[in-house]
Image (cartoon, rainbow, N blue to C red):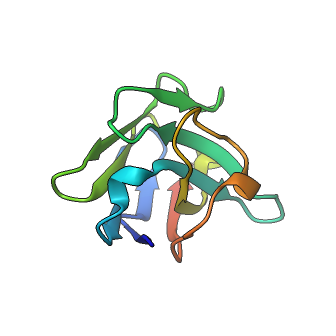
Amino acid sequence: QVQLVESGGGLVQAGGSLRLSCSASGRTFIAYNIGWFRRAPGKERGFVAGVSWAGENTTYADSVKGRFTISRDNAKNMVYLQMNSLKPEDTAVYYCAASPLGVIFTTPSTHHAWGQGTQVTISS
């Protein structure tokens, strides 16, 4: 089993940057792809980015392509989400979660081991 904990959220102005971290415990970390999702007020949880177990494959939601970068460091059991050129519409609670190996899934139902989330607020 893997357990995930997010950190790094905060309040920044539009155009700024944040780096979110997803820390994993458990020896099976490399047995999973990892995804970042977000839930904005009044909206469903939506896919943001995903990375394969070795970090060689990534995929992004159209709304964040070119602005966000997902990466992982398996030696440290960490996954990161670098967020640049932030917009007010990026305001949400951000979660990381694990999914099975193979294709990078983009739906919440294919993920498990959800963290508690970290709040990101972008002011205009």
Counting every numbered tag in the picture gives 0
Q: Residue at x 32, y 72 (%)?
A: 26
Give x and y (percent) for residue 89.
Answer: 66, 46
- Is 89 above or below relative to 65? below
In screen coordinates, is 60 left or right of 118? right
In the picture, which quadrant includes the N terminus?
Answer: bottom left
Residue found at x 53% / y 49%: 35
Give above or below for 61 relative to 106.
above
105 above or below 56?
below
Q: Looking at the rendering, which quadrant does residue 103 occupy?
A: top right
| Residue 65, x across and y down, in percent | 54, 25
In percent of the image, x 39 and y 42: which residue is there?
Answer: 53
Left or right: residue 63 versus residue 58 is right
Residue 19: image x %, image y %?
Answer: 33, 51
Viewer-side residue, 101 vs 72: 101
Camera sees residue 19 = no
Q: Residue at x 53, y 77 (%)?
A: 116
Q: Which one is nearer the viewer's eye here, 14 or 45? A: 45
Name of the residue lying farthest toward the bottom? 116
Residue 103 in sight in this render: yes
Relative to the observer, which residue lies in front, 98 or 43? Answer: 98
Q: Point out residue 92 in the picture as x, y percentages from the top left corner.
A: 62, 60
